[in-house]
Amino acid sequence: MSSGDQERLLEESLKLVETESQLMSQALKNNELMDGLKHASIMLGELRTSALSPKNYYKLFIDVTLQLSNLETHLNDQSQNGINVSELYELVQYAGNIIPRLYLLITVGTVFLNCGHVSKKQLLYDLVEMCRGVQQPLRGLFLRNYLLQHMKNFLPDVADPITNSVSENPDADDGSISDAIEAIMTNFSEMNKLWVRMQYQGHSREKEKREAERRELRILVGSNLVTLSQLDNMNLKIYKDSVLPQILEQAISCSDPLAQEYLMECVIQVFPDNYHLSTLDEFLFACKQLEDQVQIKKILGLLISRIAAYVTDEKNDAVPTDAHLFEIFSKHVEDLISSKQSLPPDDIVSLQGNIVDLAIRCWPEISEYATIVYASLISVLETLKIHSIVYGTALGKETVKFLKIPLDLYKNPLNIFQIKDYVKVLNFLDYRGRTFIASEFLKKIIENDTKIKNDDEMINVLQLTNCLMVDQPDQLEDIDTNEDFMEEQGLLARLPFYIDDSSFSNQLDLIKKLKRSLGNGGKHRIRYTLPSIVNCLLNISKRYSKECSDDKETKEEFILDVFKFVMSTVNAIYLNGEMAVPAFRYYLQAATSASKIKFDACESVVYELITKAFTLFEEDISDSKEQQDALYLLIGTISFISCLSEENHEPLRNQCFLAVNKMLRKSDQAKMICSVASLYWESKVTENNEVRPVHNGKKVLDCFKKALKVTGQCVEEIIQTTLYTHILNSYIYFYENGCTEISEETIEEMILKIRNSIESLDYYTENTFLREGLEKTIDHVRKIKNDDTKSLYKSLNL
C-alpha cells in the first residue's frame, strides 16, 4: 500500500474514533453505560486493521487508548458509587470481536483491581492468558503493551512468603514477586514471539522494510524488562536464579539475530551493574550460543563499558579488582573466537579491544593484562594468515581503534610501551594506518606535555614513529604534496621540544639520537624535521649559558659541542634536504646566537658559521631575488655581531663588497653597495676585550663611488634618477652619523645632480614621485639645518 493510501486510511480511522469517542462520552455523561461500552467497542474495532504500517498503527493506538482512558476514569468514579465491577467484568467478555473484547477486559480489569475486591494474582494471570487469543503480530504487540502499562501498577511486588502456609481465603491471595515475575515473563515471551514472527509476513523483497519496522517496535518488547527491573523486591538472588535464565533462554531459543542482539543489549541496559558482575559467566556463556549474524562486539562492548565504569567508581568498594574479572572476560572471548569460525576478523579485533579497554580502565598499573590481549591478537592474525591490514577497510578501522585505546586511556602516552607487543600489532597496518597511529601518539605527547626522559623511552618513540621518519616501501606516491604527510611531519618536527630539559647533557644526547633517525628521512622529510633540531639546539645553548653552574672547562666543551652539532645538522639540511636557502639562513641564525654567548671559541665558531653561509651564497644561490635577500641577511648579521676581531671582520666586509658583483641588475647592485657601506661604519669589532665601531670613512666613500659608477651605467633615466635619490639619502644618513668623509658639499652636489636629472627627463615621463621624494629629503635637511641645537648643514645651500 502506498504512503498516500496509508494516510487516507489512517485519517478515516481517526475520524471514526473521534466520532465514536464523542458518542461514548455523551452516553457516559447520561449514565447510559451499555451505550457507552457499545461505542467504545466500535471505536476499538478500528484496531483490528492489518492495513496500516506500524508507525500509523501506533498513531491510531495512541488516539484510541487516550479515549479509552476516559472510560476507565468514568468506571473508577462509578465504582465508588456502588457499580458492580465484577458483573461488568463478566459483561464485557461478551463483546463480539476479540480485539475490542480484550481491550475492554484490560480496562475494566484495571478498575476491578483498583477496587481491591479481586485477587491480583488470578486476574493478572487471566488477562495475560486471554491475550493469547490475538496472534497477529502487530495487533498482538500493541495489545500486550496496553496490558503491561495497565498491570504494572498492580503487580504483587512483595517478598515471597518464608513458609508454605495456605491462606484462609485463597481467592483473595494477591500473590508475591514470583507471581509478578511470572506474569511479566509470560507477557514478555509472547511479545517476543510476535515480534520475531513479523519477519515472515509479506513478500521476501520487502525484507529490509520489515526489518526497519521491527526495529521501530522493539521498545514494546523491551518495556517488559524495564518493568521487571523496577520491581522493588527484585534482588540479585531472584535475578540470578529466575529472571536472567528465562530471558537468556527466550533470547537463544528465538534464533532471530535482531531479537537476540536487542534483548542482550536490553538486559545490560536495564538491570544494575552489580547484577551483571555476579552473573558474568552465565551471560557470556549465552553469548556463545547466539546466531552468527549477531554483532557480539556491540553486546560485549556495552557490557564491558558498564562493568569498567562500575568497577572504577570510587563509591563501589565491594567489587572485585583482581585478575578474576579479567580472566572471566578473557577466557570467554577466546572461547567465543574459537567456537564461532564465521566471526569476521574485524569483529575479533573489536572483541579484543573491549578486553583491552577493560584491562586498562580497571587496572592501569598492570600492563601484563593488556600485553596478554595484544599477544592473543597477534596469534589470531597469524592463524588467519593476515599479514597486512588496509587502513580504510572494516578490519583496518577496528585495528586502529584497538591501537588507540591505550593512547586514549593512559594519561602518559609513553605508558603504551609497557604493552610489549604494541608496535608488533601496529606493524600489521599499512602505511596509512601506521602513520595515523604515530600521529595520534605525537598529538598525545603534545597535548599532555609529556617529556621523553631516557634512552629507553627515546628508542621506543623512534620505533613507533619510524613510519613518519624514513621512507617506507608502501608509502604513497607524490608524498611531498600530500596534506596528511605535511601535517604528520609538522607533528614530528615538534618532538625535539618534548625531550626532558632537566639535564642539559641528557637532553643533548637524546636530541642527537633523534637527529640520527630524522637525518635518514630523505629530502621530503628533512625539510620539515631538521630545522626544529637546529632551533632546539640554539635554545639549549642560550639556556645553558644563563643557567648552568658547571666549571668553565665543562661549559666551554658543552657549548662548543652544541654548535658543532648545529653545523652538522644545518649541513644535513643543505646536502640531504637539498635546501640551500634555508641552510644559509640557519647558518646566520646560529652565528647570531653564538655571538651572544661568552665562551673562548666564540669568535672562531661565529666566523666559521658565516663563512659557511658565504659558501652557500656563492655556490648555490643563483636566483636574483634570493641573492638580494641573502646578501641583505649577510650584511645585517655581520653588522649585528660584535665578537669578531678586525682581523676576521675585515675579510667578511670585503667579501660582501665583492658579492655585490654577482647581482644581475645594475639597480640592485647600486642599492646593495649603499647597504654594504654600513659595514664599514656601523659594524663593531672586539680588540683587547673592548668593543669598538669600525668607522672606516674612506671605505664608505669608496662604496659610494662604486654606487655612483654603477648608477651611471643604468640606461633608463628614471631608474638612474631614483638611484641617485637613494644614494643621496644614504649620504645624509652617514653625514648625520658622523662620517666626515661625506661633506655638505657632496650632499649639495648630489641634490643639484638629481634636480638636473629630473629636469632632463622626457616631457611625457611621469616624474611626480621623483620630485616628491626629493622634496621630502630636502625638507628633512632643512628642518635639521634650522635647528639651533644642531650644527649640521649650516653651510649647505638648498
Image (spheres, rainbow, N blue to C red):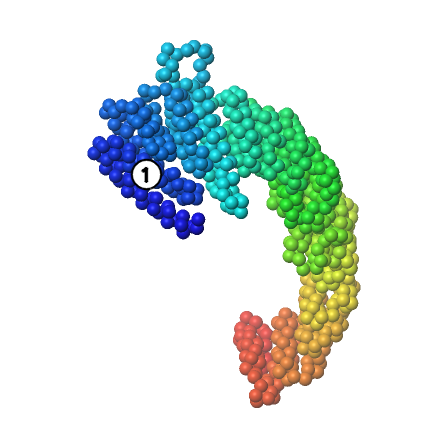
When asked about the image quadrant of residue 105, the answer is top left
Left or right, residue 600 beside residue 102: right
Q: Nearer the viewer, residue 17 or 794?
A: 17
The image shows residue 717 at horizontal and vertical percentages of: 64, 84
Residue 778 is at least partly visible in this image: no
Looking at the picture, how far across and down is residue 617, in whole percent? Answer: 75, 66
Q: Is residue 468 left or right of residue 780?
A: right
Rendering coords of residue 423 (x, y %): 72, 41
Q: Residues within 10 Å of mark 1 (few under 14, many from 20)?
A: many
Q: Which quadrant does the C terminus fall into?
A: bottom right
Write the residue at 62% across / 85% down. 757
Residue type indicated by callout 1: Met
Relative to the observer, which residue lies in front, 110 or 708?
A: 110
Q: Is residue 481 among the parts visible in the rendering? A: yes
Looking at the image, which is closer to me, 22 or 662? Answer: 22
Q: Which residue shows up at 54% across the image and 25% down it?
A: 245
The local secondary structure at tag 1 comes to helix
Left or right? Give the position of 185 relative to 104.
Answer: right
Picture coordinates of residue 589 (x, y %)? 70, 58
Which residue corresponds to the image point at 57% horizontal and 25% vertical from the top-left? Answer: 279
The residue singled out by tag 1 in the image is 43
Residue shown at 31% from the left, 43% from the top? 16
Above or below, comparing residue 136 to residue 81 in the picture: below
**Residue occupying the far front of the picture:** 96
